[in-house]
Amino acid sequence: MLIPFYSLSFRALKRSMKNITVIGSGTMGNGIAHTFAQYGFSVSLVDINEQALQKAIATITKNLDRQVTKGSITEDVKQATLKNITPFTDLVKGAATADLVVEAASENVDVKLKIFKQLDEVCQPSAILASNTSSISITQIAAVTKRADKVIGMHFMNPVPVMKLVEVIRGYSTSNEVLAKIMETSRQLGKVPVEVNDYPGFVANKILMPMINEAIITLYEGVAGVEEIDTVMKLGMAHPMGPLQLADFIGLDVCLNILKVLQDGFGNPKYAPCPLLVNMVTAGHLGVKSGKGFYDYSSGGKDLILAERFKK
């Protein structure tokens, strides 16, 4: 049973949540940094790779330009947003004054545990440590820190500036106060937070990943082709994107990692990843990020070309 949160005053919350550190400048990290900065928070964006940081700032700028063109924000808001973001390659410096840290590194449990252990050592004692993990146990992550009551999950959806949902995952020891702060902070970002309990895959991926896996199995067994499977789900089930295209968008390596977490966590063979998915990841066909997955994105255009392997 979910424990209801209590609300804090907006003024007190703003005072306690001023400085945000985002760990990781990839697709999710730069989207999270963009969103916090746009809503007036001071953001430190941390990545060990200077080139990755430069690419992230360029991506944020491009996305802000798109918002200006659409009229959803002004040029002044764009400039203010960019001024609110400071890049760091040194985690110690980037996280030293954080009121809230949002980790958005790769979906790998060992990587996350290492980051949180270090964050616990370098952050101020009052700092809340959040993970954008889409499947890994918040309780397990919290266990490597000395502040388990201040560790929580904030699972944003991609693209972060656009998608409204934030899954807020309460670990076994997460306090009521921290839950309330994160729920309200999510609302300040224009998001709709949903509290869920700490079980493998939470809600979104416990439901989504078996569906994607089943779509891959359907292709693997020769029931239908890529376009046919996606068309059935789009036109028959009113999905805005077919499951195979969505898998490409998420990253096939990420899908595989989440399915492994579900399989290990529940011990149920229904979560076993399709051999085709395993082979594609092994071959480096990861979807949009690698230029090829179930579709071919190598042309760089907006039109998707069906990957040669899956053409009839």
Image (cartoon, rainbow, N blue to C red):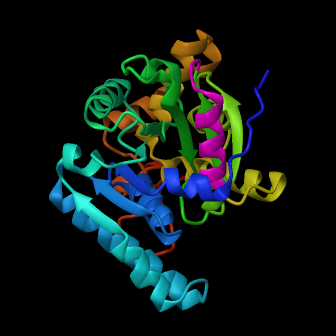
Residue lying at 31% horizontally and 34% vertically, measured from the top left: 119
The percent position of residue 11, horizontal first and vertical second, equals: 62, 59
Residue lying at 50% horizontally and 67% vertically, measured from the top left: 304
Q: Is residue 208 above or below residue 243?
A: above
User: Which quadrant would residue 25 be assigned to in this image?
Assistant: bottom left
Residue lying at 56% horizontally and 84% vertically, measured from the top left: 73
Q: Is residue 226 above or below residue 72?
A: above
- Position of residue 75 in the picture relative to residue 195 (left or right): left
- Residue 177, magenta (yes or no): yes
Name the quarter where the N terminus is drawn: top right
Q: Nearer the viewer, residue 149 or 311?
A: 149
Q: Nearer the viewer, residue 145 or 268?
A: 145
Q: Nearer the viewer, residue 272 or 111?
A: 111
**Bounds of the magenta segment:** 172-187
Residue lying at 45% horizontally and 60% vertically, measured from the top left: 31
The percent position of residue 35, horizontal first and vertical second, equals: 50, 64
The percent position of residue 186, horizontal first and vertical second, equals: 62, 53
